[in-house]
Amino acid sequence: MPIDAAKLKAWPFEPITHTYTQRDTMLYALGVGLGHEPLDTDALRYVYEPQLQALPTLAVVLGYPGFWAKDPATGIDWVRVLHGEQSLELFAPLPAAGTVIGTSRVTALVDKGAGKGALMYSERDISDAASGQLLATARSVSFLRGDGGFSERGQPSDPAPSPRMATPDSPPDHVCELTTRPESALIYRLSGDYNPVHADPAVAKSAGFERPILHGLCSFGVTGHALLRTLCGWDASKLKEIGARFSSPVYPGETLRVEMWQRGEQVQFRTKVIERDVVVLSHGSARVSD
């Protein structure tokens, strides 16, 4: 069944109530590389309970509606869906533990043409359940590789939003290198993404990978960790926005080099795997406060 653009844009998402604990907050931080250095007291605040704080990028796993594109009623060829871009806008520090409500919606569908796929833009508000305060908005772009051509059936395509800004050609102002653990994917999956391509060698091989790959959102979280460490003085309240395009997978155990260009509050970045000299997050941007 081909996709119905109007139906997808009106998809009836149920609000997701998500209660998370300090243990969940610490497990997420360990999954994105905190805790490597036992004497690093700045990082310790994100993995140790006495003065526990939540990493800003924890928001990407809160209030998630699940892999709803797999529902046959969507008409999406879900096997061929790729996570293309992710961004996060933060309005208040996340509690170290609490209950939030995730409210999702599809905001745009862009037809690239028959045989060329389509782009689906969606976003999710994460709000504090008790106060109603909006904590963050997560936005993503999914590449529906098998679902192009819907505009040729009389369903209008939305105009493509402005593309993400390319990385500068000049040398970066800041660099942070972080080595992922060999078991990073096995830790990160415990934050909610149990896709076997990140754990089972046979499944990874059938998908064309030499071994299990790291979650894209884990690479995103490691990059957020680098920005927090390098530009924010470990103060989570200073990271206001972060977004990037996923361009290549990471294998657990590889070293990520985050290159940053800063102009006041505005930051551009890209993330590379050092061992293979491959860009894995491109067209990155962030906003940090003083």
Image: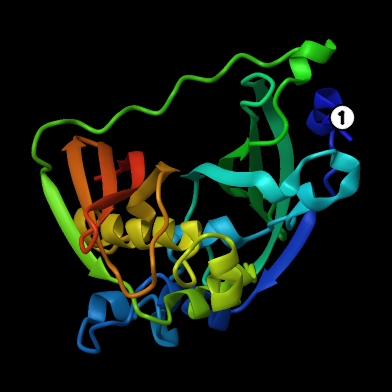
Q: Residue 126: in sight, yes or no?
A: yes
Indicate how the structure is coloured in the image. rainbow
Indicate the position of residue 279 as horizontal and vertical percent values.
Answer: 29, 48
Q: Is residue 222 positioned above or below 196 on the image?
A: above
Residue 273, image quadrant: bottom left
In the picture, measured across the screen, residue 65 lies left or right of residue 120, that is right
Give residue 75's position: percent from left, percent from top: 85, 38
Comparing 239 with 210, the one in front is 210
The image position of residue 94, as x and y in percent, is 51, 61
Q: Locate residue 39, reporting x and y percent.
A: 20, 88
In-image side of 21 versus 237 (left or right): right
Seen at 71% across and 52% down, the residue is 102
Q: Residue at horizontal 59%, vertical 46%?
A: 82
What secondary structure is marked by label 1?
A: helix
On-image quarter of the C terminus: top left
Q: Which residue is drawn at 33% across and 51% down?
A: 238
Question: Looking at the rendering, in which quadrant would you find the N terminus?
Answer: top right
Query: Which is nearer the eye, 95 or 85?
Result: 85
Q: Residue at 79% of width from left, 29% of height from top?
A: 9
Above or below, comparing residue 148 to residue 207 in the picture: above
- Position of 249 with respect to 77 (left or right) is left
> Which of the 4 quarters of the picture holds residue 260?
top left
Count numbered badges in the picture.
1
Residue at mark 1 = 7
Q: Residues within 10 Å of mark 1 (few under 14, many from 20)?
A: few
As rendered, which of 124 and 151 lies closer to the eye?
A: 151
Three-letter code for the amino acid on which mark 1 is drawn: Lys
Is any atom of residue 97 visible in this view?
no
